[in-house]
Amino acid sequence: MSGWFGAGAAGEWLWWFTWEETLWMTAAALLLDRIVGDPERLPHPVVAIGRWIRWVETKTYVAQPKGRSILFGVFLCASTVAVSALTAYAVVRACAWVHPWLGYASNVWLVSTTIAWKGLADAGLRVYRPLAAGDLEEARLYTGYIVGRDTAELDEGELTRAAVETVAENTVDAVLSPVVFALLGGAAGAFAYRAANTLDSMVGYRNEKYRWYGKASARLDDALNYAPARLAGALLAAAAALRGASAGGALRAIRRYAKLHPSPNSGIPESAVAGALGVRLGGVNRYGGVESRRAYMGEPLRPLGKEHIAQTVGLLHAFGALLLGGLACAAAWVTWGIG
């Protein structure tokens, strides 16, 4: 192990892994998540990150004045990212001290916990299956697990839209972005990203409570996902071609509709999926009874139906397979000069 833990070698990368080690371990982590996912019996590191966030919030949260709220929010953001990255680094380093292969294994496992390819696909299908069986109540229950909007009165079409939008959007922050940051910094890089993403999901809201305190967390998440979201657009178009959907429609929808989304990143995967499937996403959502209107994404060439959830999951699997294949080819090329 001449990368992270040795004296160094040609091809070393930012966190002392060699490129060969980095590529093979990241590919292995992606494959491990696809096969195993997140076993319920094993403790999940992201749960610990969430607990840290809530603990720091109880010690530092203030709503006003604005400047003080932003400052404490920056402290929450910086401390969470730093503690998460350093903890992952220390775990892998300690495991490698015991044995180099234990270091490899710990890095692969930790990176895999920041990826949710299997979990995202399963979440989409948990909504699709009761819809296919005509059970709206169960579909509403499972939709409520994956979205923040009110679901108690949603009909089949709105439940479908919620599931498709969620799976589409999370191709970036549940699959591609953790892989990108694992390539940049191993488990430490992946955990730094996952910490930022968890911060955004917990405090990165533009409501009265978190408008200023969560500002740093929201902006950091936007910045970290900026490049991966744009890469995801191209990968989703390629995935559409593999699945017999419209690659051209995906690219046209990105150009026309992505900029209309309130997020600088989420509009890209959502519009890509809408264009690939020939459906229209977006519309009115309700959060705590309050309406929030989202711009439409895509042209309604065909009615949005429950089958589009399964098709979106299919796009996700093609997306992940392309990413995994790209990593494997790159690793083979760097290691043996083939690919």
Image (tube, rainbow, N blue to C red):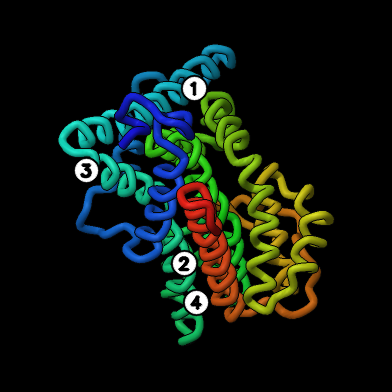
* Residue 34 visible, this angle: yes
Along the line of sight, the residue nearer the viewer: 87 or 261: 87
Inter-mark Cα distance, 4 to 3: 40 Å
Q: Gap between marks 4 and 1, in whole Å? A: 38 Å
Select label 2 or label 3 by which is in front. 3
Q: Which mark is residue 73?
A: 1
Front-most of 293 and 95?
95
N-terminal of the two: label 4 or label 2? 2
Instruction: Name the side, left or right, on which 57 lies relative to 94.
Output: right
Alpha carbon of mark 2 to alpha carbon of mark 1: how far? 33 Å
Specify which label sits upstream in the sequence, 4 or 3.
3
Q: Which mark is residue 128?
A: 4
Residue at 40% over, 22% down? 79
Of the image marks 2 and 3, the number of the one nearer the N terminus: 3
Compute the Cα span from label 2 to label 3.
30 Å
Rounded to the nearest whole Å, what is the CA distance between mark 4 and mark 2? 11 Å
Residue beneath the point at 52% across and 68% down: 317
Q: Amino acid at mark 3?
A: Leu
Look at the picture and state if 84 lies above or below 161: above
Nearest to the observer: residue 288 or residue 189: 189
Residue closer to the observer: 44 or 261: 44
Name which residue type carries label 4: Tyr
Q: Earlier in the sequence, mark 3 or mark 1?
A: 1
Viewer-side label of 2, 1: 2
Q: Quadrant of the C terminus?
A: bottom right
Residue type at mark 2?
Ala
What's the residue at 49%, 66% (across, down)? Answer: 152
User: Looking at the image, is mark 4 or mark 3 nearer the viewer?
Assistant: 3
**Which residue is under mark 2?**
121
Q: Which residue is mark 3?
A: 102
**At numbered mark 3, what does the secondary structure look like: helix, strand or loop?**
helix
Q: As displayed, is residue 296 above or below residue 183? A: below
